[in-house]
Amino acid sequence: MKKMLLSIILFAALCFDAFALPKCEGDKWDNCVGSFTAEDGSKYEGEWRNAQPSRKGTFTASNGDVYKGEHKKGNPHGKGTFTSKTGDKYIGEWKEGQPHGNGTFVYPDGREYKGEWKEGKKHGKGTYHSPQGTKYVGTFKDDLINGQGVLSLPNGDKYEGNHKNGIPHGKGTFTSKTGGKYIGEWKEGKKHGKGTFIAASGNKYKGQWKDNKKSGKGTFSSPDGKKYVGEVKDDKKHGKGTYTSPDGNKYVGEYKNDKYDGKGTFIAPDGSKYKGEWKEGKFHGKGTVTSSENVKEDLYFVRGAIVGQHIKCSDAPFDKLESLLVLHEEADSEICGMVASSKNKRYCGVLKKEIEICKSKTKK
């Protein structure tokens, strides 16, 4: 019985609110309920005050757009729902005819924004998502993603950090679906400034970036112990730098397009070294060879080979040749042009085939 009585009281209160105002009549529409259709076909039906739509009512524009909710001085103000003829829909707070406060906007294609608004634009904290899987949670300004936020893409890529005018700008972290990760500075949607990139393989670059490319000074390193410290241009080692390999080989000098080029020094694990000119990863020009016994000889190379000289089978040991061979075998060259000490303290350019022949003879 008490529940029934409570229901009756509640129903009566709602009815009283709906019919509390009289029907608008005559020339003065004030504190009444009425319907008005303009010459262009637009129509308002609801409460009036001082001859203007006020409080609750429904406005239907001549083009088919509909607003249902609260009004003040003839404009949407308070809470209300706007539905356009094209299918756009806004549900939320209004101020002086514009979305303002908290509200949800749903696009015809299923995209949705839920969050704060200011003077008709997305502004403040909000969440955007699309049916395809794109999602952004963060701050907006003037209808654009702006400030701190997290953007997740349908393919699994993710960016977390600062934005400006809808794109990454400032400091942020990008993680790709393949496992690669960049942590650092951005400019107008591109990696720019200082940053660290870690590949899924574990290879790492830490240094300067320009227009989405590694450029400036930086450090390359790999899990197996390879390391380069120096200048970089367009994602390649370029300029002056130092490279060390896991087996102890070391190069200090100039690079061009990822290859030894210019002046540089290569040092083998046994202490033997070459100091001189390079071109496209090979000895080229004048250079000085120093054995592990500190015997020096000035030589001239062309594309990795000493001009007019080849090794003789009497020259040994060949194990020292091999420590230097690795460098040029990686370059896919038939002429390795390696140098090493021998019993005669003699240095020479060699052909790969000659080394194998001589090695086989010395084993007999």
Image (cartoon, helix red, strand yellow):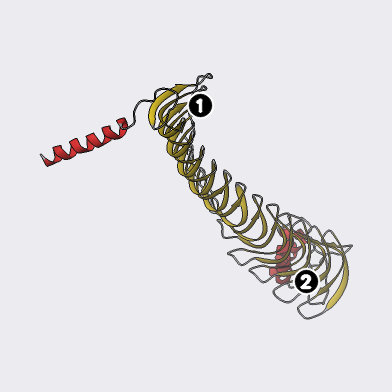
Mark 2 vs mark 1: give the one in front.
1
Secondary structure beneath label 1: loop
Residue position for label 2: 340
Q: Nearer the viewer, residue 16 or 25?
A: 25
Q: Relative to residue 134, is residue 207 depicted above or below?
A: below
Q: Nearer the viewer, residue 330 or 5?
A: 5
Figure quadrant of residue 24: top left
Q: Residue at x 88, y 69 (%)?
A: 299
* Apparent side of residue 310 relative to residue 169 in the rendered image (left or right): right
Q: Relative to residue 39, is residue 77 depicted above or below?
A: below
Q: Nearer the viewer, residue 38 or 147?
A: 38
Q: Position of residue 40 (x, y in %)?
A: 53, 19
Q: Position of residue 105 (x, y in %)?
A: 47, 38
Crowding near the residue tagged with mark 2, few <14, some 14–19, many ≥20 C-alpha atoms within 10 Å: many
Q: Residue at x 76, y 72 (%)?
A: 316
Crowding near the residue tagged with mark 1, few <14, some 14–19, many ≥20 C-alpha atoms within 10 Å: few
Q: Relative to residue 194, is residue 165 depicted above or below?
A: above
Q: Quadrant of the N terminus?
A: top left
The type of residue carrying mark 1 is Thr
The type of residue carrying mark 2 is Ala
Q: Position of residue 162 (x, y in %)?
A: 58, 55
Q: Which mark is residue 303?
A: none
Distance from disc 2 to disc 1, alpha carbons, whole Å, reads 80 Å
Q: Earlier in the sequence, mark 2 or mark 1?
A: 1
Residue 131 seen in this snapshot? no
Q: Position of residue 355 (x, y in %)?
A: 75, 63
Q: Nearer the viewer, residue 106 or 13?
A: 13
As drawn, the residue found furthest toward the front would be: 27
Q: Which mark is residue 86?
A: 1
As drawn, the residue found furthest toward the left would be: 1
